[in-house]
Image: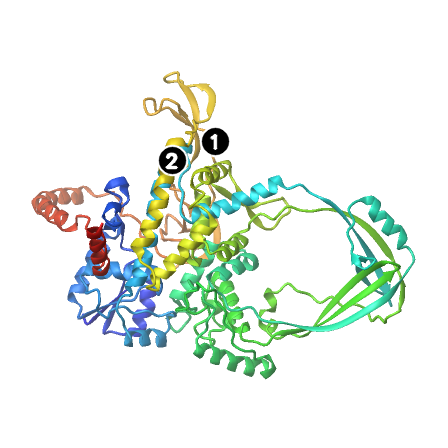
Amino acid sequence: MKNLVIVESPSKSKTIQKYLGKDYTVVSSKGHIRDLAIKGKDGLGVDIEDNFRPTYVVSKDKTDIVKDLQKQAAKADHVYLATDPDREGEAISWHLADELGLPEDSSDRVTFHEITHDAVTEAFRNPRAIDMDLVHSQETRRILDRIIGFKLSKLLHNKIKSKSAGRVQSVALKLIVEREKEIEAFVPVEYWTIDAVFNKDGKKFSAALARINGEKAELHNEEEAMQVYNACQGEFTVSEIKETSRSRGAFRPFITSTLQQEASTKLGFSAKRTMAIAQRLYEGIDIGSGAEGLITYMRTDSTRLSNVYVQAAQNKIRTEYGKEYAGYYRVSNDSNAQDAHEAIRPTNLANDPETIKPYLTSEQYRLYKLIYARALASLMAPAKYSSQGVTLSQGIYDFTASGSRLVFDGWLKVYGAYDSSKDVILPELQENDRLPAEELKANQHFTEPPARYTEARLIKEMEEEGIGRPSTYAMIIDTIQARGYVTLEKSTATSKTKVFFPTEQGKLTVDKLDEFFSGIINVKYTAQMETELDEIAEGNADELAVLRSFWDKFTPLLDTAYEKMEKIQPEKVGEVCPECGGELVYRNGRYGRFISCGNFPKCRYTRQLVTKEKEKPEPTGKMCPECGGELLKRKSRYGTYFLGCSNFPECRHMETLEGEKIEAKRSTRRTASASTAKKTTAKKTTAKKTAAKKTTAKKTAAKKTTTKKTAAKRSTKKDAE
């Protein structure tokens, strides 16, 4: 083997193999290969006393993969690490390099932001060393999350039976709970408006009371409203007409968070579903000429576009729509945006959504079309409107009406299908025209509480506050639902949009965190921590100093909470246990609420609280690649979801929601002869296997790994202390 290339995703490996040719063998690590151990003091996998030294172990489900990669690496002339171009990807490359025995400073790291022939081949012409600053940043994040997750989760489970807590997850939950408290505490205030309907030359239009005696109109009760209503029964005079023009610039191309928000509001996709679909579009789909990555990397917070794309897009705009539609390139990133990536865009403008539609699923087509339109529209000219404002007066009372007309669609030529704005055309009016009100209405209103968070609104809030990273939003939202802290449901029977409601357990969790950990579980501190992680990634901050600062603040809070947080006893059912006579209580388990004996574990009596109907398979419209049947969304006995063929058991094809094939476990049934043969073989190989296990145990004991730079730094600091 000449060259071995290791990527994260199996589907990505197929696309890249096509571009590199026979001199390269492209294989997949299937994501992270190892993680922090769960042994040692407190099960953290982190030796806090030894300057936060981490201990990594190969994940159980990756043992065979790592062994296979080691064998292939030993045969290769050169090994390239082509994992995703972000901190997680950099860390995966470092873990692979360590397990495969590759030199840390060798130039074997390859990155590309789109999976196309030109991008991939260019990347392999310019390999680099692993960026250890990025690795340190990811490692620091992982250690922080492990410490907070393990220690806070253990405390909360022990005291109030909450399932988990997290550095970012708990702050997201706090936003939802605080919004609910605002709604519960909200006191509505009465106010009134006056609306008039006019008719000019058969065309009706509405106007609303805006000013009284030159001041903003404020009507607090029915008496004040009726005073205005009675005074405005005669003719009105058109006292002022203002003609203006305005421009409305295009939206910038998508970043991760804005893609999740727009896909939620325009397509009805959850953040998790959006990222799964985008992942497939990025990794590559066969569009007739072989697999090809259709979009650039979907985990990004930069709105930058490559010069190549900008030039191609502007040529397309001028050719297809006219030179007047050509806009200009704008980029505007937040101060903490990682500008190494581009915005999310199509990799090839020739792959028009309608042209490749036959090769995409319905969901893939809809999301790709949205991304394609947004990126192209971002480089188009502003839309132009003609606006008109009219004031109709009667004595001291001024009513206003406004109209707006699109005179040049600009970027809306491409993105108009996703825009909800509409023209409002007023009839032709002249100053001093006199019009009677055809209809006059006094309307009672009450101020409304702030709106609950939708998925899109929560993501936007987290982004604006600097909580977490765009790539983590979908996982955070999924986690707080899985833990039973919030539900996502319609606020009313007629509502179309789902919003977050905190559960009682969610509220209790936030209340206790506020009481004992308000100094670290808050928006400001979490955002500050993200900034520090960014500084580590840029080489401008010391990871050990960041960890030490956090630990010194966290430890006394944890000690106080263990001492003073009240332990909540399980809720009593009001029945006696039929086996031991003890009190029966309600408990929460993996599969929901159930009834158990209060004397557990001495008495293990349990019974179900509610027998739930088995969830029915949900049609997806996707085709089974093996038999042509329909793939159905099914729920496993473990509560997770997967796609299975409708022709089961004749066809046993299964795949994840993200589209990766699931290999069914081998049947345990064996013929008598096969069973006998297996036993005979087992006797012969027992001695060899036992010896091999002992040897392997010595070699694969959880090893404490770190970089030379970090090891030296920790050693120096320890000596100094």
Which residue is denoted by mark 1 in the rendering? 610
Quadrant of the frame with the N terminus: bottom left
**How far across and down, in percent of the image, does residue 518 sit?**
45, 43
Describe residue 683's horizontal placement relative to residue 10 as left or right: left
The disc at residue 389 is none
Name which of mark 2 and mark 1 comes first in the sequence. Answer: 2
Estimate the x, y position of residue 472 in percent, counting from the top left. Answer: 42, 55
| Mark toward the viewer: 2 or 1 | 2
Query: Residue at point 52% right, 58% down?
Result: 261
**Colour scheme in use:** rainbow
Q: Secondary structure at mark 2?
A: helix
Quick one: which residue is furthest to the right in this view? Answer: 234
Q: Residue at x 37, y 73 (%)?
A: 116
Which percent across, then down, holds residue 216?
A: 77, 56
Q: Is residue 604 above or below residue 139?
A: above
* Kind of residue indicated by mark 1: Val
384 or 712: which is nearer to us? 712
Quadrant for residue 94, please give it.
bottom left
Question: Marks 2 and 1, Cα distance to the nearest angstrom?
Answer: 38 Å
Q: Element type at marker 1?
A: loop
Q: Along the horizontal axis of the image, is 685 left or right of 660?
A: left
Q: Nearer the viewer, residue 690 or 129?
A: 129
> In this rendering, is residue 594 above or below 507?
above
Instruction: Mark yes or no: residue 421 visible.
Output: yes
Reading the image, the residue beneath label 2 is 560
Q: Position of residue 616 (x, y in %)?
A: 47, 44
Instruction: Please state the total of marks drawn on the protein image.
Output: 2
Sort mark 2 into few (<14), some (14-19) or many (20+) by Cα contacts within 10 Å: few
Asked if 582 appears above or below 457 in the picture, the reply is above
